[in-house]
Amino acid sequence: MRRNRRVKILATLGPASSEPAMIKRLFEAGADVFRINMSHASREDLRERHTAIRAIEREADRPVGILCDLQGPKLRVGVFADTEVTLASGATFVFDLKNGAGTASRVHLPHPEIFEAVEPGHQLLLNDGKLRMKVTSKAAGRIEAEVIVGGALSSRKGVSLPDTVLPLSPLTEKDRENLEYAANLGVDWIALSFVQRAADVIEAKQLIDGRAAVMSKIEKPAALVDIDGILEESDAIMVARGDLGVELPLEQVPGVQKRLTRLARSHGKPVIIATQMLESMITVPVPTRAEVSDVATAVFEGADAIMLSAESASGSYPVEAVGMMSRIAAEIEQDPLYAGIINSQRPGPDNTSSGAISAAACSIAQDAGLAAIICYTATGATALRVARQRPRQPILVLATSKVTARRLAVVWGLNCVLTEDPKSVSDMVTRACKLVAAEGMAQQGDKVIVSAGLPFGRPGATNMLRVVKVEAHSVRAALGRTPQFQMP
């Protein structure tokens, strides 16, 4: 079931898509990776959905990625004596550490870290940014603020501080427990919320200890300040436009999305565009024209993956939403302008011999009109370098590990199959030609380029390119290919 598009699709699972039969339908409609949002799911939910996805993977004989999205810290005001209060613009409002019911002039804010870090002039955004305040003064356990944009405020509403770097870990105790459970269960990706600096990613990586890849959600302005450091430590990033749109002026979000997409590609790290891509399909079976253009923009920019949230998790048309997103992406990738836009952003090779060889493989494939690019990989590094170039030819990744194949399910253009390390150069060529024919990427007489490393079986040693012709015996052998994902 090779997709007819390069960009990958993440589908969030939830009440509308928790049953195995529905998850299978989402996969068949085009989902490549499934997201389980631990803000709403229990560990039992995670286990059941993990089991269902792995069963689909075995049946389809294709690697399927699983992303566990941690909730992160949630900052909220305390409770009010009345159901809600109305704050007028220009009024003064106080936040304090006194554990009493709030009034129209003050409320308990049960987060000492905020009192430590906030400074006069910083903004406070409440109720998803509907109310805006500016800090005018602070004292021990007390913040005084001017209401800039007023409105209704009720108990337990969220608080955001776009100007403040908070001395908070992105991992609450609940997150740490969920992380440990998910990593031991065998999910492929852990997504971190509330990332502010590279040290946050390092903390999570130490806890994960290689059991899963780390995806940093870029949702706070502080993360943009340290974005190079965050990218260096992360295995991928997600542009979480919903939270970014609360803490940044909305008109800045499209530019930030484009910059992050290009920056991630230059670092050779996958980038996922998320939030409200087909929002109207939560309740209706077709998207708006603006939503179609939004998805198209992410595809034109070369994002590795695009994500559905409530559309597939709790909407009325989850299968239709996945199918629509897949059709939009496939159509854009056939647009006459697509190749020119993608190529104009192509970064140079990284400063390694493996990077230079991967870039050369793409260049040779283009100049010689080859049918496909094939790369052997143990860790996925070689495949990531090839995908970074966004070549026109299909990319077949011959992975020697299920872990690697599953993690690469989120990466632009990569079609992964499992195989063993070749025993010789001759075996490498035979195996590559058989599998590229089995995947329908090349026919008898086509030429392909193969990258690998000598000696075989040693990670990080890509040092060889070979242009070969697909012979008739390879096509015949492809018919007898044995399934690779039949073991748990």
Image: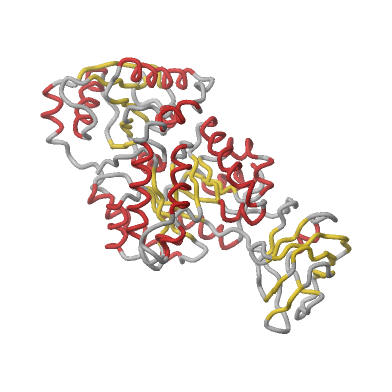
| Relative depth, front residue between 267 and 163 | 163
Position of 41 with respect to 48 (left or right) is right
Q: Look at the image and tell me in which quarter the N terminus lies.
A: top left
- Name the quadrant containing residue 313: bottom left
Residue positioned 71% across, 61% down in the render: 125
Image spot of residue 477 (x, y percent)? 13, 30
Q: Is residue 93 above or below residue 204?
A: below
Is any atom of residue 298 visible in this view? yes
Residue 183, visible in the rendered structure: no
Report the residue that reaches farthest toward the front: 289
> Which percent across, then down, holds residue 101?
75, 81
Q: What residue is rendered at 60% in x and 45% in y?
A: 201
Q: Quadrant of residue 76?
A: bottom right
Whether residue 426 is situated above or below residue 240 in the rendered picture: above
Q: How many numbered marks are there?
A: 0
- In this view, the residue in front, 340 or 141, is 340
Displayed quadrant of residue 434: top left
Nearer to us in this view, 106 or 297: 297
Taking the image as shown, residue 71 lies to the left or right of residue 34, namely right
Q: Name the residue at 22% across, 51% down.
A: 59
Q: Does residue 16 lie above or below 364 as drawn?
A: below
Percent x, y of residue 305: 43, 44
